[in-house]
Image (tube, helix red, strand yellow):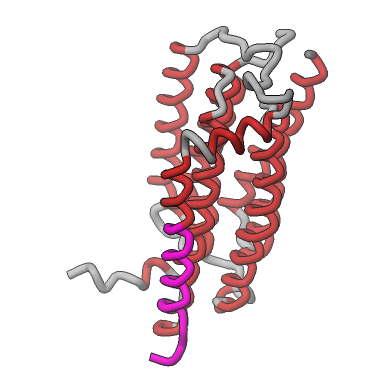
Amino acid sequence: MVAQNIFFYVIAAGMVGAAVAVVTTRNVVRAALYLIAVFAGVAAQFILLAAEFVAVTQVLIYIGAIMVLMLFGIMLTRARIGRDVDMTNDHWWVGVGTALLLAAVMAYSLIDRWGDDALPVDRQVNSVGGSNTATVSDSIFSQYLIPFEIVSVLLLAALVGAIVIARKDR
Amino acid sequence: MDDLMLNQFLLLAAILFSIGVYGVIARKNTVMVLMSIELILNAVNINLLTFGAANRDVAGAVFALFVIAVAAAEVGVGLAMVLIIYRNRQSVDLDEVDSMRG
């Protein structure tokens, strides 16, 4: 149990540091690489929460697909890579104020509501055949079948829309 | 302090969410704003899985997977829009995309 706590705090410190670097660094490519570190940390936290399938999906989709898309976007809009100044607008202090206020309110309410609640030691869900992944898939393809189909139609529509928006010959 | 607390995951997610909100407000580059939105969506996923683990319910994992799929769709459309803004204006500076302003 103590080992899990050490693991959590080391990963969490790295994630918060990398996330701050994402929103403060002056180099777009470096921001993307720090974002990969945040995503890897999130996947590690998912493992701690006994959700191994979501953790693997996080690595495949976020680190494997979304970040490649982001790097392509940076590459194709590289007007600002040479000039690393002026990545933050003039009203950044509004963002600092909003973020600090939001964090304070959320921290107060979370501590007020879930002050000392511990997670169950056995975090496996009540499972079929001892496997979390089997439970997730059974749940998706029975109880959540309609939302699953809607999400697949949404993905198709989004990809067709992306092609239509970005193509050159119009 | 033996066991993992519910709150440590929720507070981590709250901090990541606030950092993402700062990035959305303060960044000039459109691609950086999209990255900050990804930070926010990841914070939401941590919350979903934390409550799923606390209730020993699989719904948290299922909805985290849906959020990941929606995030992939959002990045695809968002980057296509960024590309066409860049093609029309040779810039991805959000301060210059202000033609909605009267």
Q: Is residue A20 above or below residue B14?
A: below
Single out the residue that lies furthest toward the bottom.
A169
> Percent from the top left, x then y, of residue A82?
63, 76
> Percent from the top left, x then y, of residue A141?
53, 40
Q: Is residue A25 above or below residue A113?
A: below
Single out the residue that lies furthest toward the left.
B102
Residue A132 in sight here: yes
Q: Is residue A169 magenta?
A: yes
Decide if residue A87 is on the left or right side of residue A98.
Answer: right
The quarter of the picture where residue A134 lies is top right
The N terminus of chain B appears in which quarter of the rendering?
top right
Q: Is residue A70 above or below residue A136?
A: below
Q: How many marks?
A: 0
Residue positioned 44% across, 25% down in the render = A106
Name the residue nearer the viewer: B88 or A123.
A123
Name the residue nearer the viewer: B48 or A136.
A136
> Percent from the top left, x then y, of residue A66?
61, 59
Residue B47 in sight here: no
The quarter of the picture where residue B43 lies is top right
Span shown in magenta: A153-170
> Percent from the top left, x then y, of residue B95?
37, 67
* Most common secondary structure along the magenta stretch: helix
Q: Is residue A165 magenta?
A: yes
Residue positioned 46% across, 62% down in the render = B28
Residue positioned 60% across, 44% down in the render = A20
The C terminus of chain B appears in which quarter of the rendering?
bottom left
Name the residue nearer the viewer: A49 or A88.
A49
